[in-house]
Amino acid sequence: MLPVPPSDVTGSTTVSSKDKAHTLETAVLHWTKQIKHELKKEPENALKNNEHPDPMAEVKFWENRSENLNHVCE
């Protein structure tokens, strides 16, 4: 997971605006990919893979999704 861009780059007066923009754009693109990857996951995937999940498997799926998306937000 890509961390928040360092403040020594984004808050620096010696780093050019172009470099700051590039750093921020890179972070946003990475976060966008992480979010899209997480949202592509479906609780039905276990059924499609011929698994026989119990109801707790879906609860666990949503707990994991929530946790993963919260990590991106952090």
Image (cartoon, grey):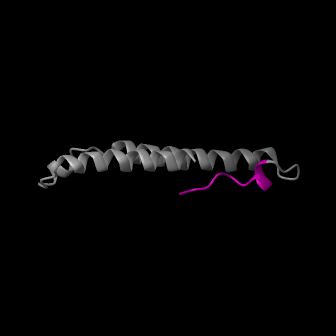
Identify the residue at image location x=25%, y=44%. Answer: 43
Identify the residue at image location x=30%, y=50%. Answer: 60
From the viewer's side, name the closer residue of 37 and 53.
53
> Most extreme residue toward the right, as rendered?
13
Q: Give the range drawn in magenta.
A: 1-10
**Prevailing SS of the magenta stretch:** loop
Identify the residue at image location x=58%, y=48%. Answer: 74
Judge from the rendering whether residue 15 lies leftward or rightward of residue 20; answer left or right: right
Q: Position of residue 40 (x, y in %)?
A: 34, 43
Judge from the rendering whether residue 42 lies leftward or rightward of residue 34; answer left or right: left
Residue 7 lies in magenta, yes or no?
Answer: yes
Judge from the rendering whether residue 27 lies leftward or rightward of residue 56; answer left or right: right
Q: Position of residue 13 (x, y in %)?
A: 88, 49
Q: Where is residue 63 in the image (x, y as percent from the top left)?
A: 36, 47
Residue 30 lies in magenta, yes or no?
Answer: no
From the viewer's side, name the closer residue of 31 and 65.
65
Q: Give the number of callouts.
A: 0
From the viewer's side, name the closer residue of 56 and 1.
56
Identify the residue at image location x=41%, y=44%. Answer: 66
Q: Where is residue 55 in the image (x, y as percent from the top left)?
A: 19, 46
